[in-house]
Each structure stands twice: as structure tokens, then as C-alpha cells.
Image: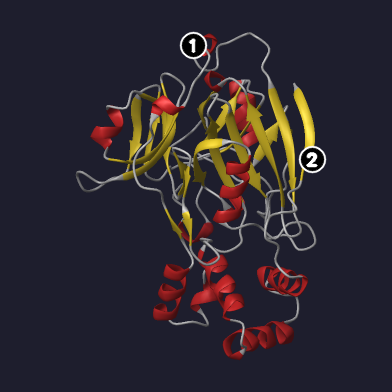
Amino acid sequence: MGRRRSYSNQKRKKRSRFQNILIAFLTAAGTSVLIFVLCVVFIFYGPFHSLRDIWITTAMGTFTHQYLATSFFSEEVIAEVMEENTMVEPDGTTDTGLIHISPQTSAQPGTSTAPIKTELIQIKQNSYQGYLIIIDDPSRVYLAFAEKIGTVGQRLPDILEKDNALGGINASGFKDPKGHGLGGQPTGIVISNGEVLYDDTTATHTLHSLVGFTKENILVVGKYTTEEAMQLNLRDAVEFSPILITNGVTALSKGNSGGLNPRTAIGQREDGAVLLLVIDGRQVGYSIGCSYAEAMTIMEEHGAVNACALDGGSSSTLVYDNELKNKPCGPSGARLLPNAWVFK
């Protein structure tokens, strides 16, 4: 299949040991009610606003645990903190001329019988761990779907087995009321084989934050209406944000850029190689999670010219060589998903 190597960057800004320990405790919500309350009081009245901000942005970055913020802070405080700790996406749309793909990658996605070249890189820092997959040939990457999409999703290993694919990551978000969704109904716009499969837009001329491949196997990121998206010659695309890198320009990180959570992202290098990233989180003693800025830095350091975040949290799942490599944080492990970026 491919080569494996570990990855560590000592130059990246590190959080203090005390902060990491406290973040780990706060993320887990504690096992002792008394200590939990004391920590909350410390955040309310303590001098470290950055810890309060991490608490709020991390909680609000989930669908099922936002009460950890809304139970203790007003809507005004939460809105202010979220505004001060976010990502400002790069302006503009993808310049496809910056990507130079070998003419040999013209096969219909998922149909090539030539040996595939991939690489699995372990990402390991003080407070988070995960994996990055590099696929040399972008024509081998495509959007696969749950067997009963629209009704119920499938776990990533099952989606891969259905498509006889070798690996992949989760893709779009999905409707998940109170954390009890069945993973079958995607949110936003979904394009497959050049056709719009799903579009929950209610207003015309709505801008979608799209990430997907053209029929020339170039990854496109940007804000487009449905009509504009169909003019891009897209073969496969989903809607998600934030956009992390556009034409080599990184997003502007404000504060802690969305808190610490499991993350999933996709990107493409100048030579066309595709980058699939998953960072685990919400697991004390193993991986707390990372910010959007940290995920963006990983993609940038591995040569991404364009990159975008995908659905994270308990949906973050990565399979390589038919093996689930990461540790999804959901209570039942890998979650039901509507679709996935896969390769074979």
C-alpha cells in the first residue's frame, strides 16, 4: 500500500503543561461534580480568560455538548467569545492553474487498476494525535455514499466495504437533532458525478462553502451559489467550512480559532496529491483535540495549496488499508455517516 512515518514539529507553538492538563479535565467534564463546579467557578472568576474562551468555543463546537457553555454563560458572552475566536477565511476562489496534475491521472475516479501510491503519516503533538493520508493520484479519490443515504447512514468501514475502497475519511455534515440523528441526511449541497444529489437551500442565490473535485481532478474550495457550482465542472463536492487555505493563502486565525475538538480536513498539493487529515479528540490521556488553526498548519506544512475543514467531532473517522486507524470519540466508536471521501 504505502509508507508510514511519524511526524513532529517542535517549532509549533506549544500550550503550557498546566493549560493542557486543565483543558483535558474541562473537555472530559470531570468525574467529580464537586471538582467540576470548582473548575467552573475558577473559570468564571479566575484571571485566565483564555481558559474560559477555550471552554466556550470547544463546547459550542459540538452539537450535543453546547450546554456546557450555555448553562454557565449568557448568549451575549458566548457570541462575543465565538467572534473573537474564529477563522477568517481567505478571499477569492480557487485558481485551478496553480495545480499541475500528471496527464496520467485521467482515469474515471475509482476505476483505475494500476497500483495506488499512498502514504500514512502519524501526527503526534503534546495534546493531540491523528493521521494524515497522502494519495499521489487525485483521480483515485471520490465521494462515496451510505447504502441508504437519505434515510440512515453507514459507518466508514462499511461504506468502504460497499465500494471496495481501500481507505478514506468522513465528508459532509448531516442533520443530527439533539445528537440522535441517523446520519443519513446530508446538510448543505452534495454533488456526485456532476449532478446535485442534495441541496437543502431554501433561498435562491445562497452561497455555499464548497469543497470538491472538478472532472480534471483539481480540488476546488470557495463560496458559490448552486448555479455557479454547476459551472465549475465539478464531479464530486460537499459543503462545509471553514476554508483553511485558498491558492496557498491561509485563513486568519483569531484567538483559539474554534476551540479544541476532533477535526477532519481535505487538501491538495501543487502536484495534485490529495491530503486527508483526521485528528482525534475528547479523550483524556490520549488526544484532547486541536483547533482549526492547528489543523490548517498541518495541511500547510505538508504542501496544501487548497484545503478545507470537513465535519469533525464524533464524526471524525479515518480508515487506511482497510483498517480503522483513529479513535473516534463517539460512545459507539465510528459514527453513522451519509458520505465519505474514499480512495481505491
User: Does residue 198 appear to the left or right of 243 in the view shown?
Assistant: left
At horizontal 52% and vertical 55% (from top left) the residue drawn is 180
- The secondary element bearing badge 2 is classed as strand
Q: Residue 28 versus residue 99: which sits nearer the camera?
A: 99
Residue type at numbered disc 1: Ser
SS at badge 1 = loop
| Picture coordinates of residue 210, whole percent (x, y) | 39, 39
Q: Quick one: which residue is furthest to the front in this view?
A: 11
Q: Where is residue 48? Give x, y as percent.
A: 61, 82
Quadrant where the N terminus sits is top right
Local crowd size for mark 1, using a 10 Å CA cut-off: few (<14), some (14–19), many (≥20) = some
For the residues marked 1 and 2, what is the alpha-carbon distance in whole angstroms? 31 Å
Residue furthest bottom in the image: 45
**Residue under numbered circle 1:** 106
The extreme left residue here reads 204
Please rate how many residues cluster around mark 2, counting C-alpha atoms within 10 Å: few if below 14, some from 14 to 19, many from 20.
few
Q: Please tell me whether residue 282 is drawn above or below residue 133 in the rendered image.
A: below
Number of numbered discs:
2
* Vertical relation: 48 (above or below) 216: below
- Type of residue at label 2? Ser
Q: Is residue 133 visible?
A: yes
Would you name the residue on which mark 2 appears? Answer: 6
Residue 121: image x %, image y %? 73, 37
Colouring mode (rainbow / by chain / secondary structure / one colour): secondary structure
Q: Earlier in the sequence, mark 1 or mark 2?
A: 2
| Screen quadrant of the C terminus | top right
| Percent x, y of residue 8 | 76, 47
Direction from residue 185 to residue 327 in the image, left or right: right
Left or right, 284 with reference to 144:
right
